[in-house]
């Protein structure tokens, strides 16, 4: 719902507000701010908006890929897209249930699209009528999620698209939008709108602001720096992804220079082969081939692949942000629920091998699987060996690991010690004949001191 006088005041405050650059942060301060994110390792992405109504189909034609892009894929002018408002009525939305699904799967945070590229807002913003308040449902969708997250101990985080196909002042005009109010869009007015909306969103106390759609020319490095500083000034504990600025290297997502703002890198639909050493990062990925709900995308990844992606990412020191795209009724599709429950079963046994762990000491990805690590208080190191390919001869050989082995067992059976032998600069663990879990069987190995691999 739009209140014009408030818009004017908010816009003025946003322009005149204190946007002094934040003081340079010390490493200790950065460690404290990024701490929960580094421990989390696993989060849920939720892409939800008006595009769930057409669900990947427009005028009888089916579209593939990310169908949250439908307005652009089908070149739908704003005037034709607007009536979707009347059909977005998520009466089956149960925020408690969504958070429960995420929490059971071992996810520690949720990132929801407060506004995607089509500009539609999931909360009743005072800055626009292009929001949930104009649908038959009317009620704020973020508040119940914020409450459920607070109750269940999950961090709520917000995706917010910078690019906005609905706002007349967004500076890159595609002819199909048909909504340019002026011949020359005013990006200062757009920035004021962006900041006033972000002020509203900060009231929900999000853990992360996850920007996107920063690549169009209208968004500049200067605006990225200004927005980052604006947000950190207002909310010093906030984490902001690198898409606030212009430095990300396409889908690979890593920063191309230290002048660019953003607290972590954002590979999209890919896992960096050797991680991104020295920086924080998070790979966001879909379960099928779309982010927003599609009625016809059946290209689901297996639960095995999703669990192994999580392990692979953790072994490289990153986070996995795994997407669901709820329907316009407010339901997470059944294939997504099934997969989350499969992941939950694995995480119930093996969560300790993911949460709060650090990257593998092996420079080459081992043939048998992946490794995550944990520094123990006594200076020794715990290795979690996630075995994908179970050794046929009952011997798991860790090539090049020169540490003294202290003890080993299956994570699921801590009482049953496995025999460790060392020879020729490698360490070998005698394992049972059969893998305990076909998705990945985890062996815990404690070694003396810091892990050393030759
Ligand atoms: O919200 C989901 C997608 O809708 C959105 N990001 C995820 C999280 C997304 N936006 N764009 N894409 C996905 C793919 C488009 C990539 C491109 Fe580009 C935009 C190719 C060229 C311009 C970004 C900038 C990648 C390369 C340069």
Image (tube, helix red, strand yellow):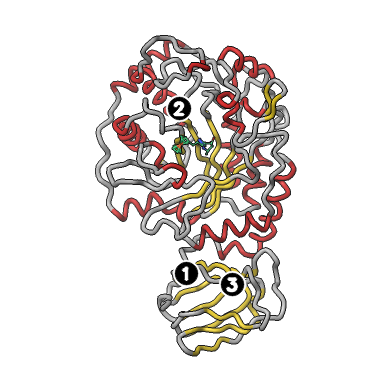
State the residue position of label 3. Answer: 368
Per the rendering, the mark at residue 52 is none
Q: Is residue 238 visible?
A: no
Quickly name the residue at label 1: 364
Front residue (pair 167, 137): 167
User: Which residue in the structure is indicated by mark 2?
Assistant: 163
Q: Quadrant of the N terminus?
A: top right
- SS type, badge 1: loop
Residue at the image position 34 percent from the left and 51 percent from the top: 30
* Residue drawn 52% across the image and 68% down it: 371
Image quarter (top left, top right, bottom left or bottom right) of the C terminus: bottom left
Q: Are marks 2 and 1 in contact (CB under 8 Å)?
A: no
Question: Which class describes the residues within 10 Å of circle 2: few (<14), some (14-19), or many (20+)?
Answer: many
Determine the image quadrant of residue 58.
Answer: top right
Residue 332 position, x and y percent, is 69, 39
Spatial distance from mark 1 to mark 3, Cα to Cα?
A: 11 Å
The image position of residue 177, as x and y in percent, is 51, 17
């Amino acid at each position: 719902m739009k209140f014009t006088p408030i818009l004017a005041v908010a816009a003025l405050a946003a322009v005149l507000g204190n946007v002094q650059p934040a003081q340079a942060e010390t490493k200790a301060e950065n460690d404290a701010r990024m701490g929960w994110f580094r421990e989390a390792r696993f989060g849920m992405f939720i892409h939800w908006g008006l595009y769930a109504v057409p669900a990947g189909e427009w005028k009888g034609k089916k579209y593939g890929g990310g169908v949250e892009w439908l307005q652009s894929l089908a070149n739908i002018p704003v005037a034709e897209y607007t009536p979707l408002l009347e059909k977005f009525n998520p009466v089956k939305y149960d925020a408690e249930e969504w958070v429960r699904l995420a929490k059971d799967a071992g996810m520690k945070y949720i990132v929801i699209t407060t506004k995607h590229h089509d500009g539609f807002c999931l909360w009743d913003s005072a800055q626009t009528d292009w929001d949930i308040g104009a649908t038959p449902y009317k009620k704020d969708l973020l508040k119940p999620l914020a409450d459920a997250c607070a109750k269940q101990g999950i961090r709520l985080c917000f995706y917010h698209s910078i690019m906005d196909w609905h706002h007349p002042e967004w500076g890159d005009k595609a002819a199909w939008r048909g909504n340019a109010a002026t011949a020359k869009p005013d990006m200062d007015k757009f920035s004021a709108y962006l900041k006033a909306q972000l002020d509203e969103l900060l009231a929900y106390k999000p853990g992360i602001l996850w920007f996107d759609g920063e690549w169009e020319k209208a968004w500049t490095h200067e605006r990225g720096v200004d927005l980052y500083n604006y947000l950190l000034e207002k909310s010093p504990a906030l984490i902001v992804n690198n898409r606030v600025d212009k430095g990300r290297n396409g889908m690979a997502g890593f920063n191309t220079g230290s002048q660019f703002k953003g607290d972590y890198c954002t590979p999209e639909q890919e896992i960096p082969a050797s991680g991104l050493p020295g920086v924080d990062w998070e790979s966001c990925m879909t379960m099928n081939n779309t982010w927003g709900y599609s009625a016809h995308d059946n290209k689901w990844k297996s639960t095995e692949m999703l669990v192994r992606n999580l392990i692979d990412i953790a072994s490289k020191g990153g986070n996995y942000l795994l997407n669901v795209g709820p329907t316009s009724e407010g339901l997470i599709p059944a294939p997504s629920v099934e997969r989350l429950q499969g992941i939950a079963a694995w995480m119930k046994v093996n969560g300790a091998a993911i949460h709060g762990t650090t990257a593998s000491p092996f420079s080459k990805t081992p043939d048998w699987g992946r490794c995550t690590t944990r520094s123990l208080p006594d200076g020794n190191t715990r290795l979690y060996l996630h075995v994908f390919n179970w050794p046929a001869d009952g011997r798991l050989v860790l090539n090049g690991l020169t540490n003294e082995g202290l003890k080993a067992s299956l994570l699921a059976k801590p009482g049953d010690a496995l025999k460790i032998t060392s020879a020729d600069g490698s360490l070998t663990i005698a394992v049972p004949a059969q893998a305990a879990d076909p998705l990945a069987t985890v062996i815990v190995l404690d070694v003396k001191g810091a892990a050393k691999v030759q």
